Amino acid sequence: MRRFTENIKIAFNSLFLNKTRSFLTMLGIIIGVGSVVAMLSIGTGAQESVISSVQDIGSNLVIIQPGNPEEEEQMMGPQMMFAGDTAELGIDDVRAIERNAELVTEVGPVVIGGAVVSYLNRNTQPQIFATTENGMELYNMEIEKGKFYNRGDVSGSANVAVIGQTVIKKIFNNIDPIGKIIKLNGQNFKVIGTLESRGTDTFGNDQDNFVSIPVTTAQTKLYGSGSYDMILAQSISEEVIDEATEEIEDILRRSRNIRVGEKNDFRVRNQTQILDILSTITNIFTVVIAGIASISLLVGGIGIMNIMLVSVTERTREIGIRKAVGAKNRDILVQFLVESIVLSITGGIIGVLFAILISIILNNFTVLETSITTFPIIIALSFSTVVGLFFGIYPAMRAARLNPIDALRYE
Amino acid sequence: MKQNDLIIQIKEMKKIYRIGKIAIPALQGIDLEIKAGEFVSVMGPSGSGKSTLMNIIGALDIPTSGTYMLDMVDVGRLNDNELAVIRNKKVGFVFQTFNLLPRANVFGNVELPLIYTKDRIRNKKRKILDAIESVGLTGWIRHRPNELSGGQKQRVAIARALVNNPSIILADEPTGNLDSRTGEEIMGIFQRLKGEGKTIIIVTHEMGIARHTQKIIYIKDGIISGQEDVKEQLSAKEMLKKMPKLDDKI
C-alpha cells in the first residue's frame, strides 16, 4: 500500500513535469470518454423523454388505427400514430367497443387534420385534433382557462374550439382568447377554452400547436368525411391493458366481420407495445453512436502507449538508479503501469466532467433532453482504466526488463 | 559482527561478455577476500575489468563462473529479484556521476532505497534525516540536485548509500568529477564511516585517493595483478588543513 501510494505520487509528479505533453496525451481519452458519456446521456435522455411523453398521454391507453398490421413493421417513428390508410374506422367501431368491452372505461374517436386558423389579420396553420368530450381525459389534456366542449357540443356539431398555447401566442398576442371568434378554413368558431402547455416531445415537435374541436364538427364542416383517424380507448387499469387490447381486437374483428384466418384491417396497440418499439429505436441509436465514440477511446489509448514508450526511453537512467538501489522488475513495471493508468483515469474523469457539462448545456439550450446516469460513467471510467492498463503494459514491460548496468550508462 | 569476518569471498571468478559470436573475457579468474570493516581501493587501467568486478560485487551483474559470497550469501546463484534485494539491503552504491533523481529533492533521493525495502521500516523519517545529517546536509533537505554543488550531490549519494545500513559501500570513482578539495572532503566522510565500522570499496585511478584507504588492489587484464597494504595512510582531515581555502585568497 505504501509503495502503491508512492507509485501514484511518482506518476503525478512525472505527469506534472510534462504538463503539455500529459494534457495532449489525455486529450484522446478526454474526447473518447467525454463523447461516449455525452452520447449515452443523449440516448438515455431521448429514451426517458419518449417514455414520459408516451406516458403523458395516459399509461392505460389503447390506440386503434386503420390499416394492415403487417405494415407497422416498416413504420417507425412518430408518424406511425397518425398513419392514414384505406381501411376506415367509423362510428360503428366506437359503438361496438362501448357496448361490448368490459375492460374499457372510455372510448373516443379522433380525427386529425390541418386548417388555416385566423383571428383578425393574423393566421397560423396548427394541427386540428378533433375528438369527443371524453378526449380531454383520454389524451391527458388539461384546461388552463374556460372549458372543454361537452356532449351537447359534440352531438350538435357545435362550432366551438379549445386552443393550445402556441396558437394563442401566434394569433392572439396578449389578448384573452376566451369568447373570441376565430376562423378555421373560413368558418367561424368560438374559443371556449385554452389548454395547459404540454411542451415538446422527444423529437422536438411542439405539442401546443393545435386546436381541438368536436369530432362531429370536423367531420361534417371541415373535412366532409365520416371516418376516424384513430380511436382511443382507456382500459380500467394499467394491469389489464394487455387483456383490454385483446378484448378490443376481438370485438372489432366480430363487428367488422373478419373471418377466422383473415388478417385484421386495423391495428390495436397499447402503450407498452409502443414503448417497446420506441425503446428499440433509441437503443440502436445509442449503441451505434457510443460505438463510434469508443473508437476515439482506442485512439487515445494508442496515444498513451506512444507517450509511455517515449517516457521509458527518457527515463532509462532513472530506471537504472532505481534498480541499483533495490527496485525489482515488478516495482518498475508497476510504476510505469500506474503512470499510464493515472494518465488514462485522469483523462477519463476530465472526460466525464466534460460530458456532464455538455449534457447540461444541451439540456438547457437545445431541444435535446439529456440524462446522465451513473452506469455510463462507471463503464467509461472502467473502460479508460482498461485502456491505460492495456496500452501501458508494453512500455512498462520494456522498462522493467532494462538491464540496470546498461540503464545506468544510458546517456 | 567481528572485525575479521570475511564479508566478501571471491573464488576463481570469471566473467565473459558475448557480443554476437565473439566472446570478450572481462574477468579471467579473480580471487579476492575482503574483511568486514576494511577500506579498500581498486586500481587499474581502463578496460582492466575493475568496473565489471564492481558490478558483480554490487549485485548488478552475476559472474559467468566461479563463486562470490557476500555476507555468507552466494550471490552468483541468485535470480533478478533476489539480486535486487541484495542491492537494496547489503550494498550502498556511490557513483562517479552521482546518479541522483533530478526531480526528487535531497530527502526523496535518500529515501529511495527504503521505498523498495519490503519490511516495514520503523522510524523511517528518522533514518533518512540521520543519513542526511551524517553527510552534513541537514540544511539542504528540500533542495533538488540541480541546486547543489558537485560535492553536495556526492554527499547526497553517500547518504542514500548509507540509509539502509548496508554491509558494504561501493564507490566507483567517487571523486572523479570533483575538484581536489571537495574530493578530499568526500574521502574524509569515507574515512569517518570506516571508523564507524563500515566496509568500503572504492574504484579510483588516482594514487592520491587510493592512499586514503588501507589496501590497494591492482587489476590488469581481468586478473588481480597485485595487492598492497598502504603503509602511510593519508588522513583527509590533515590534508584539508594543509590545502588552501578559497576564502583565504579572497
Image (spheres, coloured by chain):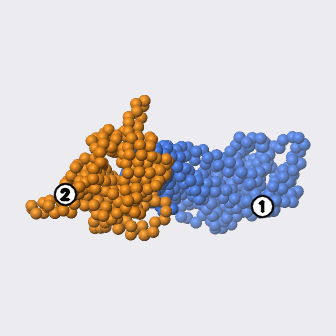
Does the residue at mark 2 contact the one at mark 1 (Cβ under 8 Å)? no
Q: Secondary structure at mark 2?
A: helix
Asked if residue A306 lies left or right of residue B133, the reply is right
Q: Is residue B162 visible in this depiction of the protein?
A: no
Query: Which residue is pictured at 38% across the width and 69% down the height?
Result: B126
Identify the chain drawn in blue: A
Query: Which residue is pictured at 65% across the width and 49% down the height?
Result: A283
Q: Label 2 is placed on what type of residue?
A: Arg
CA–CA distance in space, label 2 to label 1: 95 Å
Return the x and y of residue B187 as percentages of the image width and height.
Answer: 25, 58
Tell me the chain of label 2. B
* Vertical placement of residue A257 versus A326, above or below: above
Residue closest to the eye, B41 or A326: B41
Q: Colour of chain B?
A: orange
Return the x and y of residue B153 as percentages of the image width and height.
Answer: 28, 57
* Vertical placement of residue A102 versus A221, above or below: below
Q: Label 1 is placed on what type of residue?
A: Glu
Q: Secondary structure at mark 1?
A: loop
Query: Which residue is pictured at 27% across the width and 41% down the height?
Result: B45
Tell me the chain of label 1. A
Mark 1 = which residue? A238
Residue A260: name its quadrant.
top right
The numbered mark at residue B181 is 2
* Vertical placement of residue A399 versus B102, above or below: above
